Image: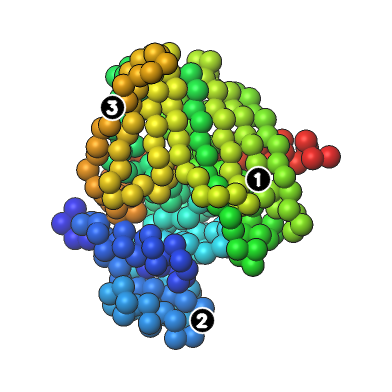
């Protein structure tokens, strides 16, 4: 690619401020061209802050901009389908926040619309694109911990009870928002889809799952234990356990500048833990770069996904947890 892809952002939320804004800035293949907000005056302020050439007071105006080649959809979950399909019809490639939609059926509509328009759709799981994740997968494939048997993934924090993610009709709930990372993690490292799903949850007053435990079984006798919560201290880690050792990723989905892999190459009770350091990276920039490479190639480049497979697992998880509640 010789010319950066020109991006438009549909919304001015916190994920733009801390994630995609810096990600677009740091990717050599992208340029933030336009930003839109439905709150009058906000887009102009954010455009100046993030260096965008254009500011719009409606999403429709941004999608009508012929210079915008790709859009990022960061809005609330129940709006993903609407604006992804609208962007596709406008001929824009779409990087859509996770989870991709509220149901598998909505996801399939979004994919069909993008396929029909000939544009790329990528779910925005930034963690998959960090160099530490790439290196962890290499070590796993090299047999550094033997045969993979167990994945343990945790993502929890105490949410503001006024947050929109407390509303089920908008796609709220711990599983949709952060449990999806554990599901994505287990699918990525196994390279497979689960053959069995179990889930139980504590349900909040608004009807969302506040805390959920997910158990997945994968081909090859691999199991995954995943927990997520909106009512617990901050925890964000993943552990891969094999027949000859294990690997830990602290701050697994939100790595700090100094990100490491903790590697144990033995089953001894008092093992030596190796610390393998990986290069510092902005995982949002890495995600954007993969997306731009996919646009140039005309199809998704690994490790990017369109989100359908992950959505199928999560819909099954929610069905299991809901059934266990009754």
* 1 or 2: tag closer to the N-terminus: 2
How far across and down, in percent of the image, does residue 270 sit?
Answer: 38, 18
Check the image and report above or below for 118 versus 265. Answer: below
Residue drawn 72% across the image and 45% down it: 202
Regarding mark 2 in the picture, which secondary structure is present there? loop
* 1 or 3: tag closer to the N-terminus: 1
The Cα–Cα distance between marks 1 and 2, rounded to whole angstroms, is 33 Å
Residue 55, located in which quarter of the rendered image?
Answer: bottom left
Residue drawn 41% across the image and 44% down it: 251
Q: Mark 3 and mark 1 in contact (Cβ < 8 Å)? A: no
Q: Is residue 190 visible?
A: yes
Residue ranking furthest to the bottom: 41
Residue ranking furthest to the left: 2
Regarding mark 3 in the picture, which secondary structure is present there? strand
User: What residue does disc 1 label?
Assistant: 211
How far across and down, in percent of the image, does residue 291 sit?
Answer: 33, 50
Q: Nearer the viewer, residue 17 or 10?
A: 17
Residue 200, located in which quarter of the rendered image?
Answer: top right
The Cα–Cα distance between marks 1 and 3, rounded to whole angstroms, is 33 Å
Q: Mark 2 and mark 3 in contact (Cβ < 8 Å)? A: no
Q: Residues within 10 Å of mark 1 (few under 14, many from 20)?
A: many
Image side of residue 281 versus residue 147, left or right: left
The Cα–Cα distance between marks 3 and 2, rounded to whole angstroms, is 50 Å
Check the image and report above or below for 296 versus 250. Answer: below
Q: Is residue 109 visible?
A: no
User: What residue does disc 3 label?
Assistant: 274
Residue drawn 64% across the image and 67% down it: 162
Nearer to us: label 1 or label 3: 3
How far across and down, in percent of the image, does residue 314 sit?
Answer: 60, 40
Q: Quadrant of the C terminus?
A: top right
């Amino acid at each position: 690619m010789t010319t950066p892809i020109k991006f438009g952002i549909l919304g001015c939320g916190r994920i733009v401020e801390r994630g995609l804004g810096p990600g677009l800035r740091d990717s050599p293949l992208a340029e933030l061209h336009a930003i839109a907000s439905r709150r009058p005056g906000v887009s102009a302020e954010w455009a100046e802050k993030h260096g965008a050439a254009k500011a719009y007071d409606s999403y429709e105006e941004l999608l009508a901009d012929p210079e915008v080649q790709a859009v990022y959809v960061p809005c609330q979950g129940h709006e993903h389908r609407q604006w992804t399909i609208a962007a596709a019809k406008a001929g824009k490639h779409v990087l859509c926040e996770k989870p991709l939609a509220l149901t598998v059926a909505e996801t399939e509509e979004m994919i069909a619309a993008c396929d029909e328009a000939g544009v790329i759709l990528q779910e925005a799981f930034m963690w998959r694109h960090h160099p530490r994740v790439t290196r962890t997968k290499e070590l796993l494939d090299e047999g550094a911990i033997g045969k993979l048997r167990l994945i343990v993934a945790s993502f929890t924090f105490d949410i503001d009870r006024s947050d929109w993610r407390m509303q089920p009709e908008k796609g709220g709930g711990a599983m949709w928002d952060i449990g999806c990372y554990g599901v994505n993690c287990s699918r990525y490292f196994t390279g497979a889809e689960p053959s069995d799903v179990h889930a139980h949850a504590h349900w909040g007053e608004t009807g969302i799952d506040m805390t959920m435990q997910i158990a997945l079984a994968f081909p090859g006798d691999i199991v995954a234990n995943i927990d997520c919560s909106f009512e617990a201290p901050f925890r964000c880690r993943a552990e891969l356990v094999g027949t000859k050792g294990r690997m830990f990723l602290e701050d697994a989905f939100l790595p700090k500048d100094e990100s490491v892999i903790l590697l144990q190459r033995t089953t001894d009770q008092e093992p030596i833990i190796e610390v393998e350091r990986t290069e510092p990276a902005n995982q949002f920039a890495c995600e954007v770069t993969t997306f731009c490479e996919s646009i140039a190639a005309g199809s998704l480049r690994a490790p990017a996904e369109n989100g359908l497979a992950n959505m199928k697992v999560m819909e099954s998880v929610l069905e299991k947890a809901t059934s266990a509640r009754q």
